[in-house]
């Protein structure tokens, strides 16, 4: 006797539309180069992610330093026009209140500013249930007390803080170092060109017959530099990256422990950003002289180095210097805005693990921030 099977379409058994997707509510601070790319990337991938991963990514707040746009049901493609028309002056607490009043769950704060005062809000966001994602490096490079207190707060509130883009932009660097360290691999040295903008500037300046200021301008226009390019040129941005890596290895260093070669002539260090940008040509002669005096077949690289006795909490030596390296060496062969990180460990001996690729740029950085948002989203339970 044969048994007939009747196929009932899945939609008749379950109303798929009624199955609730996990809604992730995101507040984004900063919509400059990185932030605006991020918003557009999220909006254009939203449907695909909803289909593939059952996640509903909802940006309910977007803010710059002046105004915020709050929308319980998320931003549309025209978010910038809408914000320009109906954005309101705000204080960050209003974003927390909005989330509370509208009973929003699965909250993520994304910091795409370079602001040192904004990070003081992290703690109250965590207190109110927000996870943190940040391309801003400041919170990881203030004093160790701030660093530890923030982590204690995160642990007590069971919240996560991801910042993969703090070092190497979109490159998978922090995660790799974290895993190596947590799994007991002894990292003995990390060395490389950590700055995408300075990589671009010195690769181009070494290869092409152009003035330093014109190359610097191109780096600014391409979105590689910090909002104030002096943060790159004075070495602070690279110093911050070095400190972030040191702290990932549980080393007890402060920013002042780093020896940094500042590339800005003294009389341009303390002027306003506008004046600095108007006087860029004053950099041309000093850098042309350096280039002329460089050994044959060598190129400039701005090299960061974390070495010393990394088995001791205070044993690290942290340096950042402009160095002449042979053109045909690994560092000398860098192209474009590539960064390179050589990670030396006990098991790998003299052959370091090498991570190399675009170390700056708004699109790759936004993609890295997006990755951190998805990592947190996947772990949320509601
Ligand atoms: N560009 C890159 O390749 C990379 C950048 N990063 C990091 O990404 C961050 C953003 O860089 P980028 O997008 O180039 O910078 P931009 O200057 O283009 O954008 C910064 C944004 O932050 C906003 N902002 C400043 N202060 C506040 C505040 N207190 N509250 C809310 N918003 C504020 C600014 O608003 P307003 O316009 O009103 O001032 C602006 O929208 C930086 O921390 C940078 O270090 C990290 C890796 C790579
Ligand atoms: N200004 C930075 C951008 C990323 O952090 C760099 O040049 O690497």
Image (spheres, rainbow, N blue to C red):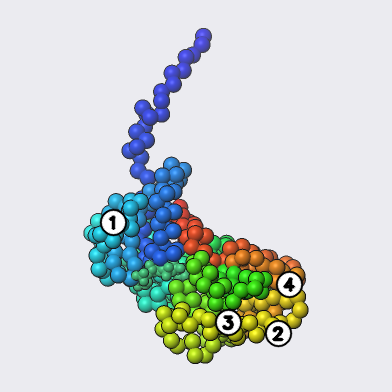
Ligand 1 contact, mark 1 (Cβ < 8 Å): no
Do we see residue 28 in this rendering?
yes
Give percent across and percent down for residue 4.
47, 14
Q: Nearer the observer, disc 4 or disc 3? A: 3
Instruction: Relative to 328, say whether 266 is above or below.
Output: below
Query: Could you tell me how far apart the alpha carbons at marks 3 and 1 are, in whole angstroms?
Result: 43 Å
Please state if 179 lies on the left or on the right of 27 as rendered. right
Check if mark 2's residue and mark 1's residue have beta carbons within 8 Å. Answer: no
Question: Which disc number belongs to residue 364?
Answer: none
Residue drawn at (43%, 83%) of the image: 275
Give percent across and percent down for residue 336.
61, 65
* Residue of label 4: 327
Q: Secondary structure at mark 4?
A: loop
Do we see residue 244 in this rendering?
no
Lower sequence index among marks 1 and 4: 1
Lower sequence index among marks 4 and 2: 2
Ligand 2 contact, mark 3 (Cβ < 8 Å): no
Question: Which disc number belongs to residue 82?
Answer: 1
- Would you call the spot at circle 3 few (<14 residues within 10 Å), some (14-19), or many (20 or more)? some
Q: Secondary structure at mark 1?
A: helix
In the rendered image, the residue lying farthest to the top is: 1
* Residue of label 2: 293
Give percent across and percent down for residue 332.
70, 71
Lower sequence index among marks 2 and 1: 1
Query: Could you tell me how far apart the alpha carbons at marks 2 and 1 are, in whole angstroms?
Result: 54 Å
Lower sequence index among marks 4 and 3: 3
- Would you call the spot at circle 1 few (<14 residues within 10 Å), some (14-19), or many (20 or more)? few
Q: Would you identify the image quadrant in which residue 71 lies?
A: bottom left
Residue drawn at (67%, 65%) of the image: 354
Give percent across and percent down for residue 218.
53, 69
């Amino acid at each position: 006797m044969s048994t007939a099977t009747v196929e009932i379409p899945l939609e008749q058994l379950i109303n798929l539309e009624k199955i609730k997707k996990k809604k992730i509510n995101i507040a984004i601070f900063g919509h400059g180069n990185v932030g605006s790319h991020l918003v557009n990337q999220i909006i254009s991938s939203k449907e695909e992610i909803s289909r593939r991963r059952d996640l509903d990514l909802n940006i309910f707040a977007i803010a710059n330093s002046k105004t915020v746009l709050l929308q319980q049901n998320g931003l549309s493609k025209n978010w910038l026009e809408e914000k320009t028309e109906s954005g309101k002056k705000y204080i960050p607490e209003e974003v927390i209140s909005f989330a509370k009043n509208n009973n929003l769950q699965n909250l993520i704060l994304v910091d795409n500013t370079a602001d040192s005062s904004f990070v003081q809000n992290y703690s109250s966001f965590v207190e109110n249930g927000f996870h943190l994602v940040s391309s801003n490096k400041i919170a990881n490079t203030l004093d160790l007390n701030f660093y530890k207190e923030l982590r204690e707060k995160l642990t007590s509130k069971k919240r996560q803080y991801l910042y993969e883009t703090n070092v190497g932009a979109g490159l998978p660097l922090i995660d790799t170092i974290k895993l190596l360290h947590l799994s007991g691999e002894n990292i003995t040295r990390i060395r490389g060109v950590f700055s995408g903008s300075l990589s671009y500037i010195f690769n181009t300046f070494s290869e092409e017959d152009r003035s330093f200021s014109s190359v610097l301008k191109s780096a600014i226009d391409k979105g590689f530099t910090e909002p104030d390019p002096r943060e790159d040129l004075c070495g602070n941005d690279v110093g911050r990256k070095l400190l972030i890596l040191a702290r990932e290895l549980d080393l007890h260093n402060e920013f002042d422990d780093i020896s940094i070669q500042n590339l800005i002539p003294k009389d341009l260090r303390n002027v306003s950003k506008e004046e600095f940008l108007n006087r860029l040509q004053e950099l041309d002669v000093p850098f042309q002289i350096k280039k002329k005096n460089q050994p044959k077949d060598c190129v400039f690289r701005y090299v960061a180095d974390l070495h010393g006795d990394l088995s001791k909490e205070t044993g690290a030596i942290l340096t950042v210097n402009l160095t002449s390296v042979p053109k045909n060496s690994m560092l000398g062969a860098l192209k474009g805005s590539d960064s390179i990180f050589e990670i030396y460990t006990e098991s790998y001996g003299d052959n370091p693990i090498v991570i190399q690729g675009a170390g700056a740029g708004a699109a790759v950085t936004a993609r890295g921030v997006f990755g951190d948002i998805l990592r947190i989203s996947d772990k949320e339970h509601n």
